[in-house]
Image (cartoon, helix red, strand yellow):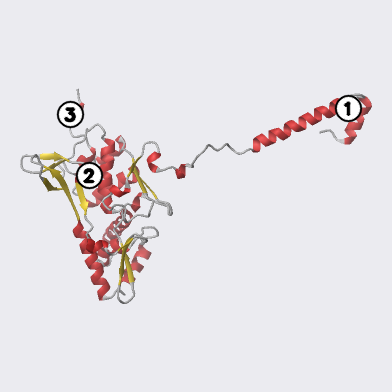
Amino acid sequence: MPDKNTEKQLQKFVEGKEKKVEETQKENTENKQVGAELSEAPAPKFPNARSSDQVSLGNQVGWQKLPIGDLPTKGFFYPEGAEVAIRSATAGEIRHWSTLQEDDISALDDMLNYILERCVSFKTKDISSSWKDIKEVDRFYILLAIREYTFVKGENNLQVKTSESSTINVTKDMIDYVNFEDNIMRFYDQTKRCFVLKFKTGNEIETTIPNVGITNFLKNYVLRKKQQNEMFDQDFITFAPFVIKDWRGLNDDSYEKLVIDSNNWSISEISVITHIKDLFMETVNPIVRYVDEGGAELTAPLNFQGGIKSIFLISDPFGELV
């Protein structure tokens, strides 16, 4: 907008045009204000719009939500509101899976985690969640769910031998992974989502079902110690998966502090923890439940024809040829 001195000069040379100039200036000023209002206006919000963080995992493209209650643990040991979703394995991931050496237990564990890390999304309300929070007993069920989501046309048939002359096709829902008996579940705390052992002395020890993050740390810890010819407490390593609740912040120093602290356990505490651990190990016994031709319900050991590697390979590869 012109200043006052300029206006006076204009009035001397352009008499009679003052009104027009003022109207033009007013119009320009209004246009600028409207432009500013438009540029500063917030983006329109659609009804019920949610951020990507708020979108349920099952509603994200390419992902399928697994009902948490269908997991072998029934979701008891995850935070309330936890969600698990899976996607199908890609050709590149299956190519890597095909190199699996099943006789190498450590390599097998790494390969199971390889698929989990890439094909599983785990989400909770309160903490930064990760596939490492998946409970060990749920891992194989989820792996089979990924397999079913990958081979939707039935190209992969997992078979278990039921007799010398017969086999059956197996799905994830036919496998009985774990049974929580009342003698274990009576120690379960709904709020803390774990087992709480209360002693007559007033002490409490919380125990839980191992998750992938903790067992993975322990495996690497043991391997590292052996490679470096270093001693480690082989007693506590059997208790550790059940008394360490979170893998976050777990390192050699924090772990070895837990080892030292465990030396203060009383005889009664050691006895109870050992009993809980043994009870849990007995409950983890994956078997296949099926109905024979006569309608009888039977069980068979979980032993896939073709081994673990067959989970993500086409059953009849030559049938894909012309």
Residue carrying label 3: 318
Residue extending farthest left: 164
Give the residue type at disc 1: Glu
Q: Compared with residue 123, is residue 227 higher up or lower down, i.e. above or below?
A: below
Q: In the image, what residue occupies the spot 34% across and 75% down? A: 202
Q: The disc labelled 2 sits on which kind of residue?
A: Asp
Image height of 202 relative to 43, above or below: below
Give the class, few, some or many, for how many residues have Cα within 10 Å of label 2's Cα (few <14, many ≥20).
Answer: some
Please report the residue visible at 46 percent of the width from the left and 44 percent of the height from the top. Answer: 54
The tag earlier along the polypeptide, 3 or 1, is 1
- Residue under the point 52% across and 38% down: 47
Q: Name the residue under label 2.
A: 173
Q: In this view, does 293 lie to the left or right of 220?
A: left
Q: From the viewer's perspective, is the residue at label 3 or at label 1 nearer?
A: 1
Q: Are marks 3 and 1 in contact (CB under 8 Å)?
A: no
From the viewer's perspective, is 178 left or right of 257? left
Mark 3–mark 1 Cα distance, whole angstroms, equals: 92 Å
Which amino acid type is marked by label 3?
Phe
Q: In which quarter of the image is the C terminus?
A: top left
Q: Position of residue 36 (x, y in %)?
A: 69, 36
Q: Please tell me how crowded label 1 is: few (under 14), some (14-19), or many (20+) other residues with Cα within 10 Å.
A: some
CB of mark 2 within 8 Å of CB of mark 1? Answer: no
- Quarter residue 57 falls in: top left
Residue at 28% over, 47% down: 70
Dot 2: element:
helix
Badge 3 marks a residue whose secondary structure is helix
| Residue, disc 1 | 18
